[in-house]
Image (cartoon, grey):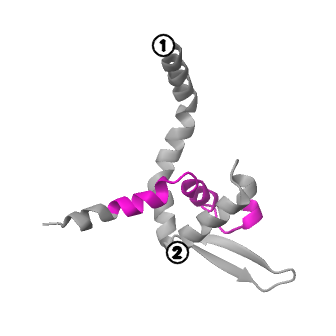
Amino acid sequence: MTSPAAACRPREVLDIVADKWSLFVVRGLADGPRRFTELKRGIDGISQRMLTVTLRSLERDGLLTRTVHNIMPPHVSYELTPMGGTLHEATAPLMRWSFENLSRIDAARAAYDARG
């Protein structure tokens, strides 16, 4: 039988991907390595600090790698690990669903708020 502590472990993993920005970063890296500035430009509304925090968290959890390139000028790139790639595969349908249903959700919220 699974202990209560072990049963909560999946929640830790879900917390990784359920934060506001992680899936956008994973999606931004799905087509290959990106530099910090490329990621920031591609994720509307993310601050530099929040992108840094999110990248560090995803790196710590083994979902992406950070590579410092010793060229002039030096630069850093980020890339999904194989595990990060499987996260993208698993969550891409959810992201697609989100984008496809935004207008319906907006309409439902407006109708709900109008009743209140």
Residue shown at the point (25%, 62%) measured from the top left: 7
Give the amino acid at mark 1: Arg
Which residue is tagged 2? 60
Q: Which residues are magenta?
A: 10-38
In the structure shown, which secondary structural element does the residue marked by tag 1 occupy? Answer: helix
Q: Residues within 10 Å of mark 1 (few under 14, many from 20)?
A: few
In the structure shown, which secondary structural element does the residue marked by tag 2 occupy? Answer: helix
Name the chief secondary structure element in magenta: helix
Residue shown at the point (53%, 43%) measured from the top left: 96
Q: Residue furthest top?
A: 115
Query: Is residue 29 part of the magenta span, yes or no?
Result: yes
Which residue is tagged 1? 115
Q: The N terminus appears in which quarter of the rendering?
A: bottom left
Residue shown at the point (56%, 73%) measured from the top left: 59
Give the amino acid at mark 2: Arg
Look at the picture and state if 56 lies above or below 17. Answer: below
Q: In the rendered view, does 92 fall on the left or right side of 77?
A: left
Question: Residue 49, located in which quarter of the rendered image?
Answer: bottom right
